[in-house]
Image: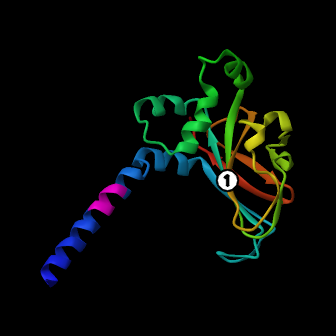
Amino acid sequence: MMRKFAGVLLLCATVLTALSADAAPSSPWRKVIGARTVRLWVDAQFMDELVLNARARVDVTWLPRSLMRLLDRDGSAEDWVVAALSNYYASRKEAAERMRGHDVLALRYRAEKNWNFDPTALTVDGYRVTSEDLLGNASIRVVGELPSGTEGTLLVRVPSLKGGRRVHLALGPDSADLEAPAR
């Protein structure tokens, strides 16, 4: 009886491991996204490596047009990456015109406390994001007063960033620098 139970348990563990491995993005995507992401803490206090009393966490990811080639070769990217890169598809003339000379920033956020999220308070190297820069369907954007635990992804259009240099990002008084890799 104990052997049967151990066998079933081993089978379940093997299946779960295989399923979780399939769901995870491939290694090239993890590296690419990690190199283009910076974490921004809103209203936080810091003690060495410890973050205290943060109102929100925002992971800002730079998704340049050049990543379309990687997506064509390896489609195992996470859904939010595919959605962000779809803004570049040239088959839609309107989208191609809107994105000319611009890149996409993905703002993946989590409200740690009640938080008033205003994406137009974001500045990227001095450029202030406007409501026209917010991508996607306006009726499904989760912005404004957010309760604790709210998570989401918002895509914004910003002037094309230059790879290989530091980009200053600020959300109100909170800021971080992204070391933009060469494209």
Whether residue 6 is situated above or below residue 100 in the rendered picture = below
Q: Name the residue under label 1.
A: 152
Task: Compare residues 100 and 151 and report the one nearer the observer.
Answer: 151
| Image position of 21 (left or right of 169) | left
Q: Can residue 90 be seen in this view?
A: yes
Q: Where does residue 178 sit, x and y in percent of width and height? A: 67, 50
Q: Can residue 109 be seen in this view?
A: no
Q: Find the magenta span and give its range.
A: 15-19
In the image, what residue type sits under mark 1? Gly
**Residue sitting at the far front:** 1
> Which residue is pictured at 80% across the width and 51% down the height?
143
What is the quadrant of the C terminus in the image? Answer: top right
Check the image and tell me how it is coloured. Answer: rainbow
Q: Where does residue 137 sit, x and y in percent of width and height? A: 73, 36
What is the quadrant of the N terminus in the image? Answer: bottom left
> Which residue is pictured at 81% across the width and 63% down the height?
115
**Residue sitting at the far bottom:** 2
> Which residue is pictured at 41% across the width and 36% down the height?
74
Q: Where does residue 121 sit, x and y in percent of width and height? A: 86, 49
Task: Compare residues 28 and 10 and report the one nearer the observer.
Answer: 10
Task: Compare residues 34 and 117 and report the one nearer the observer.
Answer: 117
